[in-house]
Image (cartoon, coloured by chain):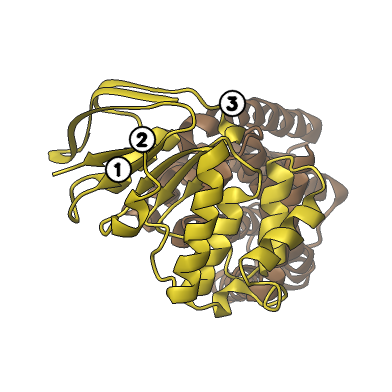
Chain colours: A yellow, B brown
Amino acid sequence: MIRARAVARRFGDKRALEPVDFELPRGGFLVVTGPNGSGKTTLLRLCAGLLIPTSGELEVRAERGQLGYLAHEPLVYRELTAIENLDLYGRLYRVPERRERVGMLLERFGLWEARGERTGSYSRGMLQRLALCRALLHDPELLILDEPANALDAAGEELLERELEELRRERTLLVASHSPQRLERFATGKLALT
Amino acid sequence: MSDAGALARKDLLLELRARDTLPAMLLFVVSVLVVFHFALPQNASARASLGLLWVAILFTALLGLGRAFVAEREQGVLDGLVLAPSDRSAIWVGKVVATLAFLVVAEVVALPAFALFFTSIDATTVAGVALADIGICAVGTLLAAMAAAGRARELLLPLLFLPLAIPIVVGGVGSSLAASSGKYLGFLALYDAIFVVLAWAAFEYVVTE
């Protein structure tokens, strides 16, 4: 589903990602590891189509609506409630039976009780759960997750693991993590950036 | 268009809750007109006072345009919107509609205030303002998106916007003062048509690499 040949990225003089080669087949689960500044986020943004490589070849066989992207930021409006944010994304992604899907995800990620609160009042962990709901909302074929366990408490991490275990059966996953031990047991491949 | 409608509704709801932009625009335009009222001599010509109206409108619009992409920039939401399978120009249309709504509300206050402080306003001037608003918001929203991606965005937007707004001022003042006001209204309509199409087509390239 993703094929990268010597993909590199610069921002001005700064090299953000050294040339990297990898292949992620459909149904695969690739964990990207590496220290801070190694280019994990840059690589994921390249694969999501938010950046263009400075050099190399990158082929991503997923249409825009079939890609779920979890970024460092939750990508939600702080003045809107969880339901309003997900409803907006649901409209833009043409999610069928949008309200039911939004309700089901909020329930599954433990946010149903806080659904009517503005997300500006959410804790970092709650925002991360909401961001996961947003990334999964349109049931994408390819999931690109940047540090999905970030800010999650123990219960949140368990929930995430259950979700990933479920998702890896039917979806293709590209997940970046600087502490990948818990993810590695699901992974079909590992890419270490330096 | 339904995507643009949803995005415009979202912007109006954000403003209703945060009240970041519209109160500032209202306060600014009234303050500017008050300052001009005292700065302009008593026997100032209609030409001078109408020129100041257009200056007030442009700078008020600039205030709104400067905040058009603040939520998206500060909360990184633009990535989420860009990745959606909808037409990316819908983001621009939504922003234009919301900014236009704020500008029209500001003008609903500004035009009577102008009539009170300076001189009466006729239907041709109102038509000129309405046509100018479309051009201001179409061009300004595109430039606001460009400026939002840069570092010196507060400087960049006026520097990019004001030169492109000169034809709007020419058309607006001309429609208010010239004997052949229809010609100037036609000029403003042509400006709108050209820049709406250009901005709509260019927006995708502004928000993606």
Tags 2 and 3 on a common chain: no
The one nearer the camera, A185 or A33, is: A185
Label number found at residue B166 = none
Q: Residue at x 48, y 30 (%)?
A: B205
Q: Residue furthest front?
A: A185
Q: Dot 2 lies on which element?
A: helix
Label number found at residue B201 = 3
The image position of residue B3, as x and y in percent, is 73, 42
Q: Chain of mark 2?
A: A
Asked if disc 1 and disc 2 are in contact, CB closer than 8 Å, the reply is: yes
Q: Chain of mark 3?
A: B
The reply to whether residue A65 is in sight is yes
Disc 3: CA contacts within 10 A as few (<14), some (14-19) or many (>=20): some
Residue underneath mark 2: A46
Which mark lies nearer to you, 2 or 3?
2
Residue underneath mark 1: A42
Q: Dot 3 lies on which element?
A: helix
Looking at the rendered structure, the kind of residue marked 3 is Ala
